[in-house]
Image (tube, coloured by chain):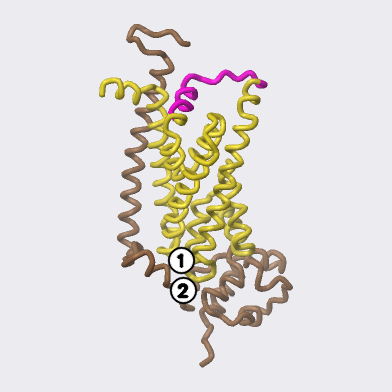
Chain colours: A brown, B yellow
């Protein structure tokens, strides 16, 4: 056990008190940061207004072709087909993909294996999705 | 989005629930993976119908509880023997935290399920302190259910814009960690015992 100083407290206890003060200060800073982030989301209208948990859980939605800028290189073709409601072979034909793993391959893996530029491939996928028109 | 998170998400899209189980289990054992971002993304995928919300919640819950049990059993089986073998002297503040956990196991286990790093430490301490398994499991399952539900549901609400809430969730996580950290220091200093004496 450590010796007590003239104030009757152990050195470890004083160290813990200092750490405690720093932690409380960090907590206040984080709270301010949280409020700032939340205000940012409100400004961008990204805080959704849902009536109840159960009713919102019943909502499923797909994306429109003009949302193709949301496509990322980490996405698989299968996922892109699904969220944009594309026919399974649409992107394969539009981009002349011969990878046997299609559609269970990511844009990044496909670009790397086909020795294509990543950004170029991403833009080609986005353009193909944008130009998709569903058959009537 | 950073490259590591992108790789994790690709793995999630390719292997779906198996990948979700692997991520959450590994993260629950102790490895620091971006599990909140992965859960938010899973919730977003569920909002699009690509994943099932309830299957995702069940898989994540089973994985998290299984991961927590690994820490608990390791500490219970080999914790004290390892400390004796390594000749590690348990510091007085760990002793006090251990005492607090023995006194209030329910609230300690339940509340720390919401704090990333703290829950892995409380799993180890619970095993070390000999908290009975049924009690550990009950509060672990309850805490994990609530914490996983709210993160998955946030991802579900924000859908494709899930990455916009990722930052806010990280800050909220740091705030919770700071609160638990401050409480742990308070317990270690004996502040709460001090207040009790004057009640």
Question: Extreme left residue here?
Answer: B199
**Label total for image:** 2
Residue A78 in the image: above or below residue B153: below
Mark 1 lies on residue: B160
x, y (%) of residue B90? Answer: 54, 20
Quadrant position of residue B193: top left
Residue at image coords 69%, 76%: A97
Residue bounds of the magenta highlight: B85-100
Residue at image coords 34%, 46%: A33
The answer to whether the residues at label 2 and label 1 have Cβ atoms under 8 Å apart is yes
Residue A81 in the image: above or below residue B116: below
Report in which chain the residue with disc 1 lies: B
Q: Main secondary structure of the magenta part?
A: helix
x, y (%) of residue B35? Answer: 53, 51
Quadrant position of residue A40: bottom left
Q: CA distance from mark 2 to mark 1?
A: 10 Å
């Amino acid at each position: 056990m450590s010796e007590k100083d003239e104030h009757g407290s152990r050195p470890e206890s004083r160290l813990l008190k200092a750490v405690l003060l720093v932690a409380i200060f960090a907590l206040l800073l984080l709270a301010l940061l949280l409020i700032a982030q939340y205000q940012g989301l409100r400004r961008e209208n990204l805080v959704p207004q849902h009536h109840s948990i159960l009713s919102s859980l019943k909502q499923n939605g797909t994306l429109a072709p003009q949302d193709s800028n949301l496509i990322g290189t980490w996405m698989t073709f299968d996922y892109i087909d699904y969220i944009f409601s594309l026919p399974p072979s649409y992107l394969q034909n539009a981009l002349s993909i011969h990878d046997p793993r299609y559609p269970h391959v990511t844009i990044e893996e496909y670009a790397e294996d086909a020795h294509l530029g990543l950004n170029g491939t991403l833009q080609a996928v986005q353009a193909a999705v944008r130009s998709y028109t569903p058959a009537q | 989005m950073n490259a590591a998170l992108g790789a994790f998400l690709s793995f999630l899209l390719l292997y779906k629930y198996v990948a979700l189980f692997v991520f959450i289990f590994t993260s629950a054992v102790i490895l620091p993976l971006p599990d909140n971002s992965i859960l938010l993304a899973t919730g977003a995928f569920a909002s699009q119908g690509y994943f099932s919300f309830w299957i995702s919640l069940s898989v994540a819950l089973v994985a998290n509880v299984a991961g927590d049990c690994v820490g608990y059993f390791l500490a219970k089986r080999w914790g004290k023997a390892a400390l004796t073998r390594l000749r590690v002297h348990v510091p007085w503040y760990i002793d006090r935290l251990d005492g607090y956990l023995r006194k209030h196991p329910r609230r300690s286990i339940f509340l720390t399920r919401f704090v990333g790093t703290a829950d892995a430490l409380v799993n180890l301490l619970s095993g070390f302190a000999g908290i009975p398994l049924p009690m550990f499991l009950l509060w672990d399952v309850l805490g994990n259910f609530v914490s996983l539900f709210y993160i998955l549901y946030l991802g579900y609400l924000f859908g494709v814009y899930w990455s916009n809430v990722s930052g806010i969730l990280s800050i909220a996580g740091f705030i919770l960690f700071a609160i638990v950290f401050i409480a742990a220091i308070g317990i270690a200093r004996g502040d709460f015992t001090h207040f009790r004496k004057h009640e």
